[in-house]
Image (spheres, coloured by chain):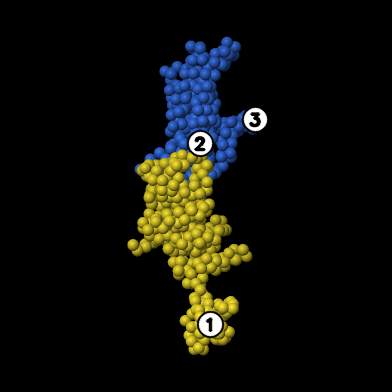
Amino acid sequence: MGSLVSIVRAEWLKLRSYRSAFVSLAVFVALGAGFGALTGWGTHHAWATMAPVSRATFDPLATSLSGIALGPIALGGLAVGFITNEFATGHLQGTLLAVPNRTRLVLSKIVVLGVPVALFAILTSFAAVLAFNATIDLAHERVVFAHPGVTRSLVLAGLYIALAVVFAFAMGLLLRKTALALSLFIGIYLAVPIIVQLLPWHWVRVAQPYMIGSLGASMLSAATPADGLNVWVATGLFTVYTVVLTSLGVVRLLRTSL
Amino acid sequence: MTPIPVIEVSRLTKRFGDLVAVDGLEFSASSGEVTGFLGPNGSGKSTTLRAIVGLNLPTSGTATVNGVNYRDLAYPLRHVGAFLDPKSLPKRLRARTYLRILATSNDIARSRVEEVLDFVGIASVANKRIDEFSLGMAQRLGIAVALLGDPEVLIFDEPMNGLDPDGIRWIRQVFSSLAVEGRTVLVSSHLINEVATVAHRVVVIGRGRLLAQGTVDELTVRIDAAVAFSSHDNEGLVALVRGRGGTVTRSEENSVTVLGLDADTIGQLAMEARIVLTQLVTLRDSLEDSYFELTEQSLDFSVGH
């Protein structure tokens, strides 16, 4: 397996060589921490006029992490492009001459994308909560790290972002066109939940909790959200989606002549 | 050093849908030799080279290096160096960075990157992004990529494209010296003159099939050689030549060209008729003529298809 380590190191070197990777990460951190501060500040000012129901159901943790929930959109381009750029330019041929084992290549790219992004997301989640606590200025509505489920949610935020990034990468691997893969990925996140809400058929709404956007809400909350899935079911399901999509992408890659 | 077959293509067939790109191709390239891989554009050269390095999987047959499939090599760059397409260079990366990435992926010492950059003469521009490179510089980088792992086998697809005459001369010297070191060098081209002076052996394909393989000399001799003569009585000798079944293809004031009889027979005829010969030469067709003759048919066929 010596060569797998070498391939991971090479792909890491490659990822770091692209300035756009740093830009995407910076946008993600700014979005995550920025939304933490913004939601804290906003809640602070709205609290006095908030309806009693909203106050009662107010979830400080989920609110502070709302920027993290948008993270996949900030990082989707980076993840999709990490493979589609190689298809678009022909660079993949050079890569495959050095790494002819395509399964290993895909595995290495996933490690290189997923692991650092997970760590970054955990740190950014902490930063988001700290920013939220600093701006909300309401002692009773701060996120208390010692509360049950809070640390778990921050770690799961890392896993959630990593899974989303690998999912986006797998979409790029399967579809190969940057624009197609990226718009479909963002569509799944943003457009599908809205469309489902608009559809007149009741049964469609049953599917809602199983959609990727909803899975994120389950994973990032300390408690199971209303009409959402249990956190571990959501985590498992997202993992299954990602593994299936990646496998399809690998099968297609193995069958392709370049 | 006796040449040993290293790259072996055996009954290789590759179909893309209905198109048969390579059709039962069989040839080898040996150590210590430059093998020219020739054929018109679209004859299946690139498909074959890609099959050798595992970029496509054969429909049937095999293409191996030292008996092993390229895809099974854990550190392929240390065994086989290939540069098939300038597009395979990542334009947005710096040349040095790209070589370092490749070296890392195959556990090749980083010092080797500087060695190959120096060797191909682009060390001074190695921090430029590849999209700032001219085609000639990109080809040199491609050769650096191929040499990076100090491999025993080297494969190049149309490496002279975009090179100026100096570059072509340089690249020929590189190929020769690599072969002298005992390496196996396979070089494709659609222009025979590009490789004729450097190749020990040539493999000619057309429409995905093998047309000929052998040394440059063997390939030339295959073609019916013409004989030219001049004598004190050209008309008389021409009559005798025709009587023996020879065909006169050209008759000028001083020189007559004949097909179908060899120089020995014509000399004999002249001696028997007591005609003084002033010149008698076997005209060896140039390699290029042989190549055209070989590939013409495959081209005609493809046009009529």
User: Which mark's residue is nearer the viewer, 2 or 1?
Assistant: 1
User: Which amino acid, by three-letter code, is at mark 1?
Assistant: Ser
Instruction: Check the rendered structure and report the hue given to chain A.
Output: blue
Q: Which residue is mark 1?
A: B231
| Subunit ID for the residue under disc 3 | A
- Kindly identify the amino acid type of the residue bearing the numbered disc 2: Ala
Residue occupying the far left of the picture = B1
Residue at 52%, 38% (x, y): give it: A81
Check disc 2 and report the residue beneath it.
Answer: A79
Between the residue at mark 2 and the residue at mark 1, the CA separation in whole angstroms equals: 81 Å
Left of B210 or right of it: where is B114?
A: left
Along the line of sight, which residue is nearer the eye, A31 or B38? Answer: B38
Relative to residue A197, is residue A258 depicted above or below? Answer: below
Q: Is residue B210 visible?
A: yes
Query: In this rendering, would B131 be left or right of A101?
Result: right
Chain rendered yellow: B
What amino acid type is highlighted by mark number 3? Leu
Instruction: Kindly identify which numbered label has been placed on residue A198.
Output: 3
* Secondary structure category for the residue under label 2: helix
Quadrant showing the C terminus of chain B: bottom right
Q: Residues within 10 Å of mark 3 (few under 14, many from 20)?
A: few
Tell me where residue A148 sits by quadrant: top left
